[in-house]
C-alpha cells in the first residue's frame, strides 16, 4: 500500500478517540450494506467432500526454534519480553513456547492475554493532508509470542486447506511464490491466448473496501466447517483466536480506551501472509 511509516503524525490534530470512531463508522456502514445483498452467504458454496481437519498436531521443539529464529528482530509495543531477548536465548524460549502451544492446541483455545491489538494510524502518503482522517491507514501490532503461535498453527491449517476441492487454485494473494506480478502474468497470458484464438476479453475488477475489517465472524466459521471440513478442536481454536478480541488506538503518548472487535479479524502476519490462503478466499460475507 506504500504506507509512509516515517511520517510524523500531528498528535494535536489526530486524537486517538475520534480517529477510531471514524474507522468504526466506515465498517458499520459497509456491514449494513452487505447484509442487504443476500440472506444466505453460503448459498454458492459447495459442501466439503474431502478429508476433515479436527485435531491439531502439537509442535516439536525444533519447529518452534526455527520459527523463533525466522521472526523479525523488531519487537511489538505490547511485548513483555523483547524480541531481542527471545533471539538471544532461542533454545530456552523455544522449550517454553512449545509447551505453551501444545496446551493451546490440546484445549482448542487461544490465550486471552494475546488478544489485544495496538493500532497505530499512519499516513498512506507523506504528501496527503494530515487533517483528513481518511488519509490514514490502521496498522495493527500484536504480541510477538502470539505471532509465533499463529505461524505454527498455520502450517497445519495450510496443509489441509490447500488439499480441499474448494480451495481457489488461482488465488495469488498471500501465497508463497505468488504476488500481484504473478496474477498479472496469468491474466495477460489468458488475454493473449483468447486474442490468438479470435476471442474478445471482458475484464471485471472488484476492489473490496476494508475487507478484513468487515468480515462476518459467524459466516467465516460456518464456511470453514461447511466448505473446508474444519471442525472439532481446530474450529474451536480458530473461533477462540477470532472471538473476544480487543484493541486500542495509540497516537504518540495518547491512547484510546480498549474496545471490542465487532466485525473484524486482524490482518496480521497470521491472517495477512499465512492464514489468508484460507480466510482471504473464504471470508467476504
Image (cartoon, rainbow, N blue to C red):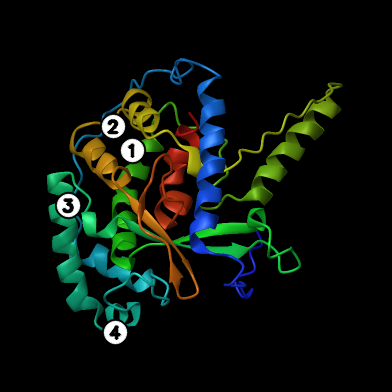
Q: Residue at x 53, y 56 (%)?
A: 18
> Does the rendering let one see residue 106?
yes
Viewer-side label of 3, 1? 3
User: Could you tell me residue 241's position as x and y percent?
Assistant: 29, 47
Q: Is residue 171 left or right of residue 66?
A: right
Q: Earlier in the sequence, mark 4 or mark 1?
A: 4
Judging by the rendered image, the residue that carries numbered circle 3 is 104
Q: Earlier in the sequence, mark 3 or mark 4?
A: 4
Q: Is residue 115 left or right of residue 170?
A: left
Disc 3 versus disc 1: distance between alpha carbons?
A: 19 Å
Q: Earlier in the sequence, mark 1 or mark 2?
A: 1
Disc 3 versus disc 4: distance between alpha carbons?
A: 25 Å
Q: Earlier in the sequence, mark 3 or mark 1?
A: 3
Judging by the rendered image, the residue that carries numbered circle 2 is 230
Q: Quadrant of residue 159?
A: top left
User: Could you tell me residue 3's position as x and y percent?
Assistant: 63, 64
Q: Judging from the image, what secondary structure is the residue with disc 1 in?
A: helix
Judging by the rendered image, the residue that carries numbered circle 4 is 88
Q: Cβ–Cβ below 8 Å for labels 1 and 2?
A: yes
Q: Quadrant of residue 225?
A: top left
Viewer-side label of 4, 1? 4
Viewer-side label of 1, 2? 2
> Does the rendering let one see residue 169?
no
Viewer-side label of 3, 2? 3
User: Could you tell me residue 29's position as x and y percent?
Assistant: 56, 34
Name the mark on residue 160: 1
Crowd around label 1: few <14 · some 14–19 · many ≥20 (10 Å):
some
Crowd around label 3: few <14 · some 14–19 · many ≥20 (10 Å):
some
Residue in the foreground of this view, choosing between 231 and 191: 231
Disc 4 versus disc 2: distance between alpha carbons?
A: 37 Å
Amino acid at each position: 500500500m506504500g504506507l509512509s511509516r516515517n511520517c510524523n503524525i500531528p498528535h494535536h490534530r489526530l486524537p486517538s478517540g475520534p480517529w477510531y470512531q471514524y474507522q468504526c463508522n466506515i465498517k458499520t456502514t459497509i456491514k449494513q450494506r452487505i447484509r442487504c445483498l443476500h440472506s444466505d452467504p453460503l448459498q454458492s458454496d459447495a459442501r466439503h467432500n474431502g478429508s476433515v481437519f479436527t485435531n491439531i498436531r502439537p509442535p516439536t521443539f525444533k519447529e518452534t526454534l526455527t520459527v523463533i529464529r525466522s521472526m523479525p528482530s523488531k519487537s511489538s509495543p505490547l511485548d513483555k519480553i523483547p524480541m531481542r531477548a527471545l533471539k538471544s536465548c532461542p533454545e530456552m524460549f523455544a522449550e517454553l513456547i512449545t509447551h505453551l502451544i501444545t496446551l493451546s492446541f490440546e484445549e482448542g483455545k487461544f490465550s486471552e492475554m494475546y488478544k489485544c491489538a495496538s493500532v497505530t494510524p499512519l499516513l498512506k502518503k507523506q504528501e496527503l493532508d494530515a487533517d483528513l482522517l481518511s488519509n490514514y491507514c490502521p496498522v495493527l501490532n500484536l504480541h510477538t509470542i502470539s505471532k509465533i503461535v499463529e505461524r505454527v498453527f498455520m502450517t497445519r491449517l495450510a496443509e489441509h486447506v490447500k488439499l480441499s476441492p474448494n480451495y481457489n487454485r488461482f488465488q495469488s494473494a498471500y501465497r508463497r511464490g505468488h504476488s500481484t506480478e504473478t496474477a498479472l502474468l496469468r491474466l495477460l497470458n489468458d488475454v493473449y491466448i483468447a486474442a490468438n484464438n479470435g476471442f474478445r476479453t471482458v475484464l471485471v475488477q472488484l476492489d473490496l473496501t476494508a475487507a478484513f475489517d468487515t468480515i462476518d465472524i459467524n459466516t467465516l466459521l460456518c464456511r470453514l466447517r461447511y466448505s473446508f471440513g474444519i471442525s472439532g478442536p481446530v474450529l474451536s481454536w480458530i473461533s477462540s483466536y477470532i472471538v473476544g478480541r480487543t484493541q486500542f488506538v495509540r497516537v504518540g503518548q495518547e491512547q484510546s480506551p480498549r474496545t471490542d472487535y465487532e466485525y473484524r479479524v486482524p490482518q496480521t502476519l497470521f491472517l495477512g501472509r499465512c492464514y489468508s490462503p484460507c480466510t482471504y478466499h473464504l471470508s467476504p460475507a
